[in-house]
Image (cartoon, rainbow, N blue to C red):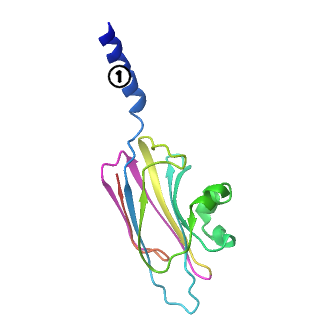
Amino acid sequence: MKLTGACLLVCITALFCQSEVTAAQSDIALQLPAIETSQYHRPYVAVWVEDAQQQPVKLIALWVEKPDWLKDLRRFWRKIGRSNTALVDAVSGATQKPGSYTLHWDGKDDTGAALAAGSYTLFVEAAREQGGRSLVKHEFNLPAQGAVIDIAAEGELGAVKATIR
C-alpha cells in the first residue's frame, strides 16, 4: 500500500508541475546602429516579454538616461513604464553607444518564477531624442528547446537574434 501511495503522489506532483517550464539561460543579441546625424543622442532601449494575453511578464533590460523620455518608448510606457516605477528603477541602466550587446535572461518572470509552458512574445523597442522610434517583436513558445529568433534591422535597431532555451 505504501508503494501505491508513493506512486500516486509522484503522479499527482508530475501533473501539477507539467505546465511549468524549467528555467534556462537564454541569450538575446542586439545591435544599435551608428546613425549619422548632426545631433546624435543614444537611444533608450527596452527589452521585455509578454504572455499570450499581452501582459508583461519579464522586463529584461531598460537603457535610459532621463525619465522624461521614457514616454517615447510608447508600448513599453503603456505596458510597464507608467504603472511599475519600482521595476523600472530596479532594472534600468545607462544608455549604450552604437555597437553589439548580449543580454541574458534566466527564463523567469519578474517575480523570479519560471514561466509556464505557452506562447510568449519578445519585444525590443528603441527611441532617440530628436530621432526615430522602432518596435520589433517576435512570438515564441515555451518550452523552446533552443529556438532561435531572428529579427531584421529596423530604424533605430540593428539586427536582433535570440536563442530561447
Q: Main secondary structure of the magenta part?
A: strand
Left or right of residue 88, residue 59 in this image: left
| Residue drawn at x 42%, y 43% as measured from the top left | 118
Measuring from the top left, give residue 32's x and y in whole percent. Answer: 45, 76
Q: Is residue 28 above or below residue 20?
A: below
Q: Is residue 37 above or below residue 64?
A: below
Which residue appears farthest toward the front when viewing the image? 2
- Count numbered badges in the picture: 1
Q: Nearer the viewer, residue 159 or 104?
A: 104
Query: Residue 102: which quarter of the image?
Result: bottom left
Left or right of residue 28, residue 84 in this image: right
Disc 1: CA contacts within 10 A as few (<14), some (14-19) or many (>=20): few
Left or right of residue 118, residue 44 in this image: right
SS for callout 1: helix
- Does residue 154 show up magenta in the picture? no
| Residue drawn at x 64%, y 68% as measured from the top left | 70
- Does residue 146 show up magenta in the picture? yes
Measuring from the top left, give residue 80's x and y in whole percent. Answer: 62, 56
| Residue drawn at x 68%, y 55% as measured from the top left | 83
Query: Residue 26: which quarter of the image?
Result: bottom left
Q: Nearer the viewer, residue 26 or 52?
A: 26
Measuring from the top left, give residue 128's x and y in whole percent. Answer: 58, 78
Residue labelled with disc 1: 10
Quarter of the figure that contains the N terminus: top left
Left or right of residue 144, residue 69 in this image: right
User: What are the residue bounds of the magenta stretch?
Assistant: 130-153
